Image: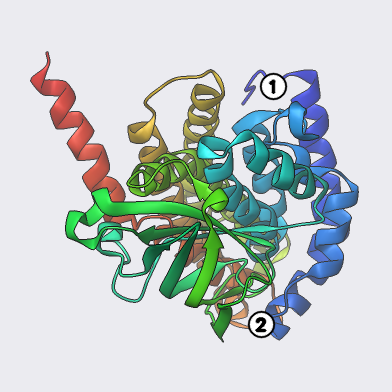
Amino acid sequence: MNYFLSEEQIALRDLAREFSQGKIAPVAAEYDQKAEFPWPIVKDMARMDFFRLWIPADYEGMDAGVMSLVLVTEEFSKACGGIALALAGTALGTFPILIAGTEEQKKRTLPLLASGEALAAFCLTEPEAGSDAGAIQTTARRDGDDYVLNGTKHFITNGGVARYYTVIASTDPSRGSRGATAFLVEEGTPGLIFGKKEDKMGIRASATCEVVFQDCRVPKANLLGKEGQGFMIAMKTLDRSRPGVAAQALGIAAGAFDHAVRYARTRRQFGVSIASFQAIQFMLADMATEIEAVRSLVYATARMIDAGEKDFARESAMCKVKAGDVAMKVATDAVQIFGGYGYMKDYPIEKYMRDAKITQIYEGTNQIQRNVIARHVIKESASL
């Protein structure tokens, strides 16, 4: 479909596609197998200025918005959803700084993030606070001009490889989510410790580990926003980042679909290609239709955010839930089209199925997204 992209967006998409197929695709299986973070590829991303896209021009970025992040993440994820996360995960960790950072904080961090010299990570999830993000137990106690953080965050994307960690901790546990506060914690801060590296089913090229705070002393100057605004900052961050997760899911689905179409055209059974069988044709038709529907929703949501709309939580949840479900369905059907070969690691398609699953889980499970969508729908219907 024609999504009426600007000339700049078309050029960016084509550049990302060339990079994805030339740099990421040839090494995707290797990084997946070794579960290694792809530093050489990340450095290439930085040289190509991909980390500048969503950062304002005042801080050495390109000010190209969420739409640019979506376009690039989709193309990268067609080759490898895990490697794409080095970029998308940094965007996630950067959004709290863009949303609530002071001018000093932005000037200190954003140019380094824009150049790719530094990566970022977002620390919200805890062992006992997954979907219930308001139940965080990591604390931040005021001590003079510092805050002392104690607690454990887990399943942190870019954990152990990022320079900047945007962290949600409780400064007043008695107030629940209203007592949460956001902090900027830098690599090398005493008391910042990296724990267990997760051995994941999919997205294995992405660094995922525990981030532990043991009497981690953070200066007051690293407070993001004000005390008690942490939960609000976290929710605004996730609303802004979920189209990126949706774009990752979209890219995984599109990549799996491309493999399935090529295989169906070349695989022969009963003397003909399996693409001539109506059962396969119907599967491919449904896959193509669902992918296009997701792309329409994701692009529309990204444009809505870039246009300055104030409330896009419903649309952000919609594109994330739809994209994640479609990625899993398309990847599963692609494995089915490959048949027994699809189950073997000699072929690339099983990786897409493994990578797809996480898009239904992280940054708010798809069940939680449905709660968000329903809440908005019911609230809007009451005002009619």
Residue placed under numbered mark 1 in the picture: 5
| Rendered position, 60 above or below 145 | above
Q: Quadrant of residue 62?
A: top right
Does residue 245 appear anywhere in the picture? no
Point 58% across, 53% down: residue = 93
| Rendered position, 291 above or below 160 | above
Q: Nearer the viewer, mark 1 or mark 2?
A: 1
In which quadrant of the rendered image does the N terminus lie? top right
In which quadrant of the rendered image does the C terminus lie? top left
Residue placed under numbered mark 2 in the picture: 345
- Whether residue 9 sits left or right of residue 317 in the image: it is right
Counting from the top left corner in percent of width and height, residue 43 is at: 86, 59
Classify 10 Å Cα crowding around label 2: few (below 14), some (14-19), many (20 and above).
few
| Rendered position, 133 above or below 297 | below
Mark 1–mark 2 distance (CA, rounded to whole Å):
37 Å
Determine the residue located farthest toward the top in the rendered image: 384
Residue type at the position of mark 1: Leu
Counting from the top left corner in percent of width and height, residue 224 is at: 50, 46
- Whether residue 108 sits left or right of residue 286 in the image: it is right
Counting from the top left corner in percent of width and height, residue 138 is at: 36, 69
Q: Nearer the viewer, residue 134 or 15?
A: 134
Q: Are marks 1 and 2 in contact (CB under 8 Å)?
A: no
